């Protein structure tokens, strides 16, 4: 009322999908909008590669904001929200603020980049002494997020950076696990991750790429977009420009 503006309410997920499909179709020069990580399971050989979303359907679009929505997209106008989780970027920042005293997303990520989550989490090898070969569980896999914090001595030996890293790994692993289940249920092999949680967050992107590649034995490709947090705004603009 003060600014004398007229507001038009649009559907968030409609705008998100419209923006993603439009941006990838119009980028003709410069770096590709879409990319993936080659060799995500090998840190020394892991490199970023461009990817063209030609004939993108079907795809699983994972929108990671405060919470997370998992969208199966079959065509420009045909999609469904498969499921969601309340454990998203807002959870990461909220827990980091409580556990470390940080106050911004950038500060939380900076702390996480310097921490070691294995001091906080209980791993498969901590329980079984190594791999649990019968069920294909490697010793380095997380058996219990924050599981080591039941021990007073271990609580006293960790840093705030370790807590931030463990929080990031916990949230990211949960998203990756649900993504894989959704992709299997919908029989979709391409997954596109978007949302402000991934802004300046290469740590989580590589964790997601690693998880998708390792647990699917190379069948699932994790794709990312350069302008991860802006597609809803682009879709809204396109809707406003639509004469109909």
Image: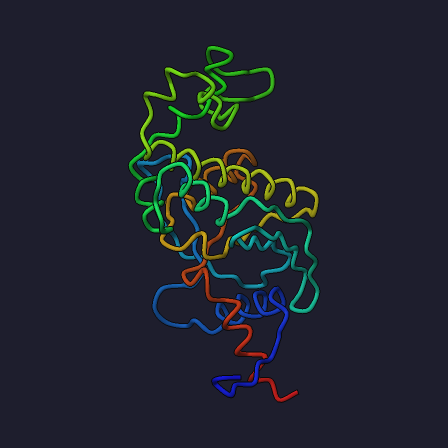
Image position of 55 (left or right of 200): right
Q: Position of residue 104 (x, y in %)?
A: 36, 51
| Residue under the image location 56 percent in, 51 percent down | 67
- The residue drawn where x is 60% and y is 66% is 12
Q: So how many labels did they put on this image?
A: 0
Residue at position x 61%, y 55% from top?
A: 59
- Taking depth in this image into account, of 139 and 12 the one nearest to the observer is 12
Name the outermost residue toward the top. 129
> What percent of the width, then of the height, locates residue 212?
52, 40
Depicted 201 relative to depicted 230: above or below: above
41 and 228: which is toward the camera: 228
Which of 112/186 is in front?
A: 112
Q: Which residue is outermost to the front?
A: 2
Residue 242: give x, y in percent of width and height: 60, 84
Image quadrant occupied by the C terminus: bottom right
Q: How is the image coloured?
A: rainbow
In the displayed structure, 151 sits above or below 17; it is above
Residue 192, given in percent of the width and then of the height, sits at 53, 54
Identity of the residue drawn at 41% across and 41% down = 96
Residue 24 drawn above or below residue 62: below
Which quadrant of the view contains residue 183?
top right
């Amino acid at each position: 009322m003060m600014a004398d503006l007229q507001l038009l309410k649009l559907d968030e997920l409609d705008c998100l999908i419209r923006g993603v499909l439009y941006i990838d179709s119009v980028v003709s020069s410069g770096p590709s909008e879409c990319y993936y990580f080659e060799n995500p399971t090998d840190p020394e050989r892991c490199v970023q590669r461009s990817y063209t979303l030609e004939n993108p359907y079907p795809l699983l679009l994972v929108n990671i904001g405060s919470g997370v929505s998992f969208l199966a997209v079959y065509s420009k106008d045909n999609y469904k929200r498969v499921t969601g989780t309340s454990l998203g970027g807002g959870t990461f920042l909220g827990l980091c603020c409580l556990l470390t005293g940080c106050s911004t997303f950038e500060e939380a990520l900076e702390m996480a980049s310097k921490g070691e989550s294995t001091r906080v989490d209980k791993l498969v090898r901590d329980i079984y002494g190594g791999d649990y070969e019968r069920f294909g569980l490697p010793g380095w896999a997380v058996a219990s997020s924050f599981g080591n914090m039941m021990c007073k001595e271990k609580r006293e030996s960790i840093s705030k950076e370790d807590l931030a890293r463990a929080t990031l790994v916990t949230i990211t692993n949960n998203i990756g696990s649900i993504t894989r289940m959704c992709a299997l249920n919908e029989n979709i092999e391409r997954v596109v991750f978007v949302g402000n949680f991934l802004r300046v967050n290469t740590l989580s992107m590589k964790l997601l790429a690693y998880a998708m590649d390792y647990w699917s034995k190379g069948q699932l490709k994790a794709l990312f977009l350069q302008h991860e947090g802006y597609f809803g705004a682009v879709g809204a603009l396109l809707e406003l420009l639509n004469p109909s």
